[in-house]
Amino acid sequence: MAQTSGFQRPKPWADMAPLLVDIAIGRQKADLVIRGGRWVNVYSGEIIDNTDLAIAGGRFAYCGPDASHCIGEETEIIEAEGRFLVPGLCDGHMHVESGMVTVTEFCRAVIPHGTTSMFIDPHEIANVLGLPGVRLMHDEALAMPINVYVQMPSCVPSAPGLENAAASLGPHDIAETMGWENIIGLGEVMDFPGVAANTQRMVGVVAQTMRAGKTVGGHYASPVLDKAFHAYAAGGPADDHEGTRKEDAIARIRQGMRAMLRLGSAWYDVEAQIKAVTEDGIDPRNVILCTDDSHSGTLVNDGHMNRVLRHAIECGCPPVTAIQMATLNTAQHFGLERELGSIAPGRLADVLLVDDLEAFSIKRVFARGVEVANGDGMAVDLPRFDYPDRAKTTVNMKRDLVAQDFDIAAREGANSVRARVIGVVENQAPTVALEKELSVESGLVAMDAAQDVCQIALVERHRATGSVVNAFVSGFGYDKPCAMASTVAHDSHHIIVVGTSKSDMALAVNRLREVGGGVVFYSSGEEKALIEMPVAGLMSVEPSSVVAQKADRLIAAMAEAGCTLNNAYMQHSLLALVVIPELRISDIGLVDVRSFEKVDLFV
């Protein structure tokens, strides 16, 4: 049985108001007082020196120049010693599964980096386990010492007719989950053509969320800002994180949406879009910083929202403005301004003690008035959460594969073919649709190292159909015999394998069948790196620090085989995402996402 007991949320402000009033005026005493800090006030945009904070029952009672009247014999006192008092950071859009770990281990990785609120969209597990999978992550999130809100996945599968997931969710499922305790809204609405076309499914899921008074997440992944974009905005999505250009951020804000600027392990979309604020003077109140997808190596080694914040500041955003984008703006967007995102009376006492704003060096982290991390790492233990066996038996293949399963036959008598090739774009989620002339050897289309063209295959793993779809991809730069396979293949999460060696491709896929999911790298018949992820084939049960070490080995193995892409695993995992242009692979074939139709491999 899953363990759902853990840290308790403080009582509602309405219930605690009399106590907070008594403490603020001095009739009762605080649990904790932090003295002598520099208050980063995200409401006024000021930094206020010599500030004290009085905390009781997990909420701020007093924020002002002298909290001595709030101190009693039992009050714990912490000297800030002139450090900045910053609200706990909020990640407005992210997927825990991309961290390769469970909610618990994700929190263990990011709490020391100052993240105290996350808005997670578990649509990865939803595509594999359906509504029961969402419920598991929902319940795990409730047990955490920080605020982990759940957005109900909106598009399972992401593009009906273009892929087949293990589950399918519709408006009735959305309606059911809107009553769950920790559901904050609807996850990213990826089927943007469906919204523009008023399909029954998309109209239904958005309407159910809006009627519940909750936030609809957006995902408009086209660079074309035409009538379809305006129709999408009219359909109800309240934010969007798929922009990559300054004009994308501006267009969304002008339509009344929040522009979410992401910096993940491989998506570097802040620098171009932040210019809407720093160069064009667009109101920053409608800009939110987020990560979207970060794997464990990034989380443990480089950081989380603190990394995004530092990057925004490096790109010219004033520090206090950047902090607003990672705190108050996010809270306001989700209707939680009176709960989090600021240091102010009544709010949850999520506060960071920071030595330097630009470097954003964090000394101590408090969540709900409890110290949860400091310079020594985590200061609290997290409750264990066990996923049931049914969540760990999701790699269903008809048989082991052999090298011949990846043969691509040419048209009879052809000496060469012109093939459609998926082109990887470094540090961005979109791909480009390429065409390459490839030679034919013994009736089979050959890969071409000189053109950086290797093979990609999508292996069905939900219903053991035995289906293998083969195609070509360019951009990884592999110059040795190798293959990488992963059961993380957004969004339907079959097995995706990329390689220069068909025998290595077969070994890699079969290894994932053996271990129950994850990601593995082979070179010349030898296993070089393995991350076991048995939970839905998406998440490890190991600590985030261990998974980070394995992720580092994976990246090193890819580099040894010639790959120079930044965080190429993230690019690999998105090659089946048939809602982001231009060209993708799915279990039905090659998909042109510009026209949302299946296309032939050969031109």
Image: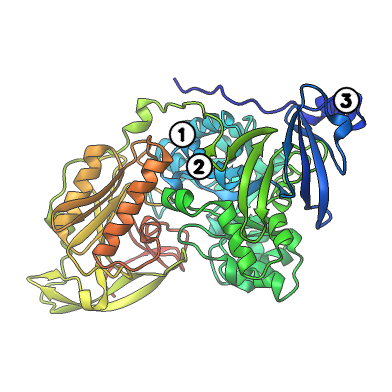
Q: Residues within 10 Å of mark 2 (few under 14, many from 20)?
A: many
Real-space Cα separation, disc 1 to disc 2, in angstroms: 8 Å
Q: Residue furthest top?
A: 1
Mark sitting earlier along the chain (1/3): 3
Q: Which residue corresponds to the image point at 13% horizontal and 74% vertical from the top-left?
A: 440
Location of residue 173 in the rendering, given as x and y in whole percent from the top left corner: 55, 35
Name the residue nearer the viewer: 127 or 193: 127
Q: Earlier along the polypeptide chain: callout 3 or callout 2?
A: 3
Q: Nearer the viewer, residue 190 or 46?
A: 46
The answer to which image quadrant residue 172 occupies is: top right
- Between the C-alphas of marks 1 and 3, the distance is 40 Å
| 391, above or below 90, in the image | above
| Between marks 3 and 2 in the image, the one whose residue lies nearer the viewer | 3
Residue 328 x, y percent position in the rendering? 73, 50
The amino acid pointed to by label 2 is: Pro
**For mark 1, does the 10 Å Cα neighbourhood hold few (<14), some (14 to 19), or many (20 or more) residues?**
many
- Give the labeled residue for mark 1: 133
Determine whether the residue tagged by mark 2 lies in a helix, strand or loop.
loop
Q: Position of residue 203 (x, y in %)?
A: 61, 49
